[in-house]
Amino acid sequence: MNKTILLKNRPKGRPSTSDFAFIEEEKPAPKEGELLLKAKYVSVDPYLRGRMRDTKSYIEPFKLDEPVESGIVAEVIESNNSNFEKGDFVNGMLQWKQYQTSSGNGLNKVNKETAPLSAYLGVLGLTGITAYLGLEKIGNLKEGETLVVSGASGAVGSIVGQIGKIKGCNVIGIAGSDEKIKTIKDKFGFDEGINYKTTQDMSKALKKHCPDGIDVYFDNVGGEILDAVMNNINKYGRVINCGAISLYNESETPTGPRHEGTLIKKSVRMQGFTVRDFVKEFGPAISQLSTWLNEGKITFSETIVEGFDQIPQAFLDLFDGKNKGKMLVKVY
């Protein structure tokens, strides 16, 4: 039998395990031109929360009573497609199923000899590509500038900070525990870190750690931390709006400070960033990230939960910050 995870309800506020349903069905057989895939690693990411709303966005919302999908590394179990062989490993956007068939469209072969399979969902997958292209397309980092990163110990944020150091920047990370602050400094090379959970005045803390102001802010959380950054942004500063996890579970749109005046007076560039807008540049991004990884200039952290049945809970744990780096589920 084959297990599948469906979206049962559209969450109101914070999601729960009751919003998902498990079903069992017969394991599929590949038709001519198709592959049979077995999931090995499943990526769970904060942006999936947005797809659970029935609203228009940059990507189609999930449909009720149909499988959830995300980035998955899978093994080719059977192949009726000349482009793939049994035993190949691939990654792509796939459904939360133990086994599934595919035409091969949208799948990329990955080499487990070059890097661990899990890395192709993290530093060498959309995570790393997001960090790299967000900085390249909007950040336009210059040596000696100050880069601030929120969600700094997370999958994207930890890569952003390391690229900042490669570029010769002063890098400040914001994360949610003293342990995470120690990690971003000791493992990822951040210059300083701020624990937002124990900081009473974020604007003041940023001013202390960024005495020359902030040139680039890579935003993964939105909300009050963004507000504090804008109080310290420099002339011609750049803000990359990549994520807003602090707002994802809000049932109503929060109201905060108005930043138009700051944007105008300081000629600040604030731009929303969706990595899928730059699909044609994924290849060069992966090539550069692979080079840095092989040279030891970047590293990565993973939180790996084991068991297909744990996928929904692993997703929910993101909102409690239980992950260090990329959150993945290893499927037996």
Image (cartoon, helix red, strand yellow):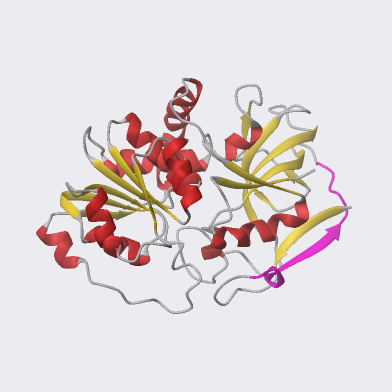
Q: Nearer the viewer, residue 179 or 148?
A: 179
From which residue to which does the magenta span run? 16-30
* Above or below: residue 187 compared with residue 69: above
* Above or below: residue 195 compared with residue 29: below
At which x and y percent is residue 182? Answer: 46, 44
The answer to whether residue 279 is visible is no
Question: Going by the picture, which residue comes out furthest to the left?
Answer: 265
Q: Residue at x 61, y 70 (%)?
A: 15
| Location of residue 62 by image quarter | bottom right
Q: Residue at x 45, y 58 (%)?
A: 58
- Total labels drawn: 0
Please say whether residue 105 is one of the residues in the magenta stretch: no
**The C terminus: image quadrant:** top right
| Location of residue 121 by image quarter | top right
Q: Residue at x 56, y 54 (%)?
A: 45
At which x and y percent is residue 106? Answer: 59, 40
| Location of residue 12 by image quarter | bottom right
Please say whether residue 17 is one of the residues in the magenta stretch: yes
